[in-house]
Amino acid sequence: MNKDGNEGFILKEDVKLMNEKMTRPEKEQVTFNKDRIAWRIGLNNFAKHLFFLSTVFAIVVLGILLYQIVVGSIGWLDWQFLTNNLSIFPEKAGIKGAIMGTLFLMMIVIPITLIIGVATAIYLEEYATEGRIQRIIKVNISNLASVPSVIFGLLGLTVFSRMLNLGPSILAGGLTMSLLVLPIVVVASQEALRSVPGFLREASYGMGADKWTTIWRVVLPISIPGIITGAILSISRAIGETAPLVVLGVPTLIMKIPTGIMDDFTVMPIQIYYWTLDTVLTPEYAYLASATIVVLLVTLFILNSVAIIIRNKFQKKF
Amino acid sequence: MRNLNGNKSKFVYQVKGLNLWYGDKQVLKDINMKVLENEITAIIGPSGCGKSTFVKTLNRMTDNIPIVRTEGEILYNSQDIFNSEMKVEELRTKVGMVFQKPNPFPKSIFENVVYGPKIHGIKSKKTLMEIAEQSLRGAALWEEVKDRLSDNAYGLSGGQQQRLCIARTMAVSPEVILMDEPTASLDPVATMKIEELMEDLKKEYTIIIVTHNMQQAARISDKTAFFLSGELIEFDKTNKVFGNPADKRTEDYITGRFG
């Protein structure tokens, strides 16, 4: 009996025989089916365990990572660490500058990505006429989302830092980061808009509403949870991203806390990067890096939780 | 010409030589039809005969489908609705529509009813409340929902949702209400309620209703139009169409020989 799994459940031959109502020894047919079923059940068990192992692997890796980081940060992560300025003495060093840099960066990234991202999505989903050009744009926005971040860094360096002469300022960094995460917001918003059923739009048009009224009063209120979820996830990405800012030339040794968008700045991931590099000189920097990673992870964890809460709370069913 | 109320009546719609294509496929072929004020006109015919498309053309809901092309004239109160001076938003406030599947907004019952008045600029809470009550009474829903106007419309039953949609349409005070198989997704009790409601609505509105249900057409309508493969085969008083159809194909259809 063939057990390589390539055979169909019922052989063509069987169908033919059944169709012709030809009698076949019943016993033989039953044993054939039994073997197949045992084989299928075995395969299912094997698959189940394989998938379970894959899941365990991912969780174990995450566990090891978290354990190492948290253990490294113990004794170093305290209130002083969050509020102190940078220092060359590990005991005195704090990440206030990096935290403020991250906050300032978000003040640029959030409004720009939300406004441009949602506007783009509305145009593509609601206004643009179906056609080749619209399809090309849509596909390319999705492609843009997978462009490596370092390339966006080069774009930011050329356009914002050099051509517009913004240097490695918060504004230049914020604009670069906005470009990086914009495709994510656009794609998420497009999906949110698309999920609004057509019959609701029809209802609104049927009462003499124009397109914008319909979008503003019917489509957006329903799709806003999806849009916000996408926005929060993209902001998480921007907070954790390092490469584009390194390319822009954002320094780490900032003794001065930034006060405006034209100031030089640094952010948490860059702080982690340089501290890790400098462990060669001062081994204690490794602990500082760990402590910063904990702060960064907690921030991202909170943001992702908020996204999930919003998604669950405002989910509407039709 | 006099209508049922004895008033001198007018033609709300005059359709002249209407042709409509979906891409290359012709869906409506040379339709000529006149609709009198304060009458219920039923449109019957087998699936895919173009009856829904025809009704959607009457308030230009077909505008939203890019591949649709039309030819001919539809006069609404002697004004061509395809004329560039006719604003489609304005036409739709005069010609409301109730759809096959109840489609309330995921908002409160009150917000659903006052959606139309609100977008057309009425802001006063008092006026909106009056409109809401009037419309809900008109749609025979007031008694059932008056204590829970702020509840979500999706908590209502299918039949109530459909009456809410009718109330929502009435709140814009249209002249004509188009109904595209409004009872297709409802149970017999809810269907009966809507049919009773239509009898009342007739006094104030002109109703054009697409239906798959022959008994429904016979019960409620004054005139019946029979569509087949995009052509208007027969259009006459309902008694005549059902009692003594002029065309063999109409007779075959209403006696259930096909469709």
Image (tube, rainbow, N blue to C red):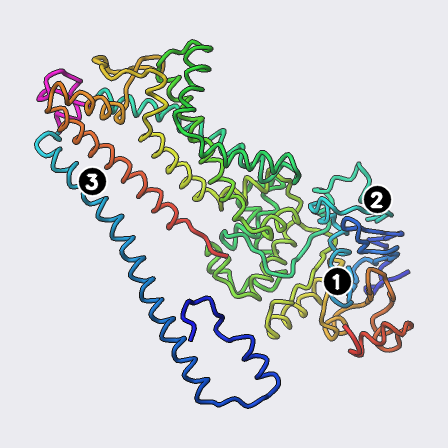
Residue at mark 2: B80
Residue extending farthest front: A1
Q: Which mark is residue A283?
A: none
Camera-side mark, 1 or 3: 3
Residue B56 or residue B140, whichever sits in front: B56
Question: Would residue B11 be counted in the magenta stretch?
Answer: no
Q: Which of disc 2 and disc 1 is earlier in sequence?
A: 1
Whether residue A108 sits left or right of residue B191 in the image: it is: left
Residues under labels 1 and 3: Cα distance?
62 Å
Tell me the tag on residue B48: 1
Q: Residue at x 52, y 66 (%)?
A: B157
Instruction: Say which residue label 3 marks.
Output: A65
Determine the CA span between mark 2 and mark 3. Answer: 72 Å
- The secondary element bearing badge 3 is classed as helix
Between B11 and A11, the one nearer to me in the picture: A11
B64 relative to A24 in the view: left or right = right
Q: Position of residue A169 (x, y in %)?
A: 35, 14
Asked whether, in this view, residue A132 is left or right of residue A157, the answer is right
Which region of the structure is painted magenta?
A79-95
Of all chains, the one bearing label 1 is B
Q: Quadrant of residue A113?
A: top left
- Give the residue displayed 21% in from the left and 48% down from the top: A60
| Residue type, label 1 | Gly
For marks 1 and 2, give the one nearer the viewer: 1
The location of residue A124, given as percent across then percent down, is: 58, 36
